[in-house]
Image: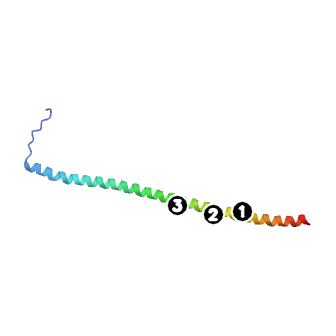
Amino acid sequence: MLFKSNKKYTLSDIQKLFSQIPVIFILLLAILSLIISYFLLETKKNTKIDLLKQKAFLNYEFKKKQELNEFRIKVKEQLKEIFLHEEILLKKVTYK
């Protein structure tokens, strides 16, 4: 009531409007889907990178743990041998 539009549209104006709307809609939809796809792919890439970093870190820790365990076993065996040798020597000395 405040703004009355008295403009009359012709058939050619309506035809232009209907022929341009689908093209604009498709372009906007394509741009929106490209943006969403980009963010999804970027997130997926970042997640894979984080998982690879975690895997590398866990492998590193596992290897270090194995090395420490092997070192502990080796030292334990060496100590057994040394103590056995010392025990034999002590028995010889106490026997005399």
Q: Is residue 9 left or right of residue 33?
A: left
The residue tagged 2 is: 67
Picture residue at 69% right of the left edge, 65% below the top? 74
The mark that comes first in sequence, 3 or 1, is 3
Q: Is residue 81 left or right of residue 66?
A: right
Labels 2, 1: front one: 1
Q: Quadrant of the C terminus?
A: bottom right
Q: Is residue 56 left or right of residue 93?
A: left
The mark that comes first in sequence, 2 or 3, is 3
Labels 2, 3: front one: 2
The vertical placement of 96 against 11, above or below, is below
Q: CA distance from mark 2 to mark 1?
A: 14 Å
In front: 54, or 42?
54
The residue tagged 3 is: 56
The residue tagged 1 is: 76
Could you tell me which secondary element the residue under label 2 belongs to?
helix
The kind of residue tagged 3 is Ala
